[in-house]
Image: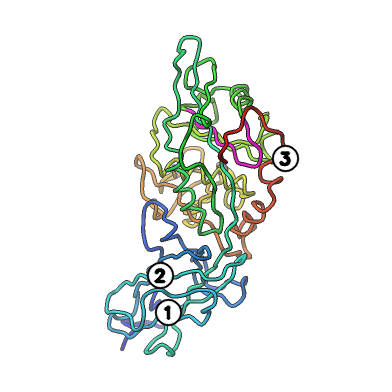
Amino acid sequence: MAIIKELKTAIPYRVVPVRFERATTGNPNARRPDIDDRGYVATNPSGIHGPVVGVLKDEEVEIRLRRENISNDASLFITTEDTSVIRIVRPMGQLSGSSTHIVRIRGLDGGNPQGARVKVRFGSAIGPVIHELGVWVWDPVTVNVTPHLVTITSSTDTTGIGSVIDFPAVMRMVNDIWKPAGIVFNFPRTISAAHRMTVNLATAGTVATTADFNQIIQNRWVRNTINVYCVSRFNISGASGLEFLGFGFSTNAYASNGINRPSIFLADSSPSINRDIMYWANDLAHEIGHFLALWHPENVQAPNARADTWSRRNLMHNYNSMFGTSPATGHNYTARIDDVGYGMFNGSARRGCMLCLKDLSQLTEDDQARRARTQAATPATLYGNLTNLGTAPTTP
Ligand SMILES: [Zn+2]
C-alpha cells in the first residue's frame, strides 16, 4: 500500500500524496521561484490545475516535489503532454526513492502566458495522474530603470554624504523577484559618474521635505525609464514614528504628493535599520510594483492590513518588516506564522517576494503578473510622458 496515511475516523480527511513547493528558502532566486499555490483550480489559461509557476521563454526553473503521504518506494513519474510549450529537463524516467525531488522545467514557447501542465503519474509514465503543476511561460516584457546616486552636502559639510547602495546587485535581485511574473528590468551593469549627482540641502546626507525631493529631481530626471534616487537618510515626520526607507511616487501618485516627476526614493538606513541587499531589493521591487499598477493586497491600509499568510508572502504587502504573531499597537493584525519563507531580519519576518499569478474570483486585486505586464506594455502610462530634466546618463 503506497498511501501511508492511516484513516482512522469517518471525518472527511484530505490526503495529499505529493506536493509541489518552492525549491529554496530565504532570498529570491528566479531559477527557484515562489509558486502560486493558492487553491487548486485555475481557469485562465484553461485546463491548468494545481499550483502554478512562471518561467520566461528560453529559461529554466526548478521546483521541489515532496512525497507527503506516499511512501518513498512508490513508483512515480513526471510527464508533460505540452511538449511544444515546456520541456522537463529532469528527472527522466522513474523517480528515485528520495522523499524530495528537484524538477527542472524549460520554457520553450511563451505568451501572455502560454500554459502547460506537468503531471505526476503513479506506476508508469502513462499511469494515473496523482498531482499536477501548471507552468506559465512568458514572452518577457522589459522595463527600464535608471539609478541616480545622490550625495547631499550642506553649508557645514561641503563634502557631503552619499548613498552606499550596490545598485546593480540590488537590481539583479529585483529581476529574481519579477522574472517569474514575466517582467525583466533593464538597468546599467556598472555605475558611472553620469549616474551620480551632488545636491546641497539643509542637512548633509538627509532628505527632509517635499522641496528636497523636488530639488533632487530637478537636477536630473530621464523620460522612458523609472528614475530611482538613492540617498543616505530620510528625516520625514510621519504617523506612528515609522522610520521611512523608501518612497514611491508612481505616475498616478506623484502629483497629488506635490512631487514634480514620477520617481522612487530609497534611503540606505534609518536610526534602527541598516539594509542588506535583500532588504533593498524587496523594497525597490515593491515600489516598482506600484509603478506597475499594483496596490497592497486587496488595497487595504493600516490598521487593517491583511494578516493572512499569502498576503504576508506577497511582494505588495504593506510592510517590509512584518509585524509578528501578536498585534502591534495601532494595527488589527495577528499573523499565524512569522517567517513566510524569506527569513528574518532584525528579529522580524521579512515580507515575501511572491507575485500572484492566479486570478481568484474572491479577490479584487489578484492576477498581479498580467496586470503589471499590461501596465508595462504602455510606456507613456508607466513612465509618464514628460520632458527630461538635466543631462541624461547614456545608459538606461
Ligand atoms: Zn506600498
Question: Could you tell me residue 128's position as x and y percent?
Answer: 44, 88
Q: Quadrant of ligand 1?
A: top right
Question: Residue 149: where, in percent of width, then height?
Answer: 50, 30
Is 14 on the left-hand or right-hand side of 134?
left
Q: Which residues are magenta?
A: 221-231
The residue to which callout 1 is attached is: 11
Q: Amino acid at mark 1?
A: Ile
**Kind of element beneath mark 2:** strand
Q: Quadrant of the C terminus?
A: top right
Asked if the residue at tag 1 contacts the one at tag 3, i.e. Cβ–Cβ closer than 8 Å, the answer is: no
The crowd level at tag 3 (other Cα within 10 Å; few <14, some 14-19, many 20+) is: few
Which amino acid lies under the numbered mark 3 shown in the image of this protein?
Answer: Asn
Per the rendering, the mark at residue 156 is: none
Residue 77 in the figure: left or right of residue 356: left
Q: Residues within 10 Å of mark 1 (few under 14, many from 20)?
A: few
Q: Which residue in the protein does label 2 denote?
A: 104
Q: Specify whether tag 3 is near ligand 1 (CB below 8 Å).
A: no
Residue placed under numbered mark 3 in the picture: 385
> Which residue shows up at 53% across the image and 56% down it?
355
Point out the tag, 2 or 1, that comes first from the N-terminus. 1
* Residue lying at 39% horizontally and 86% vertically, measured from the top left: 122
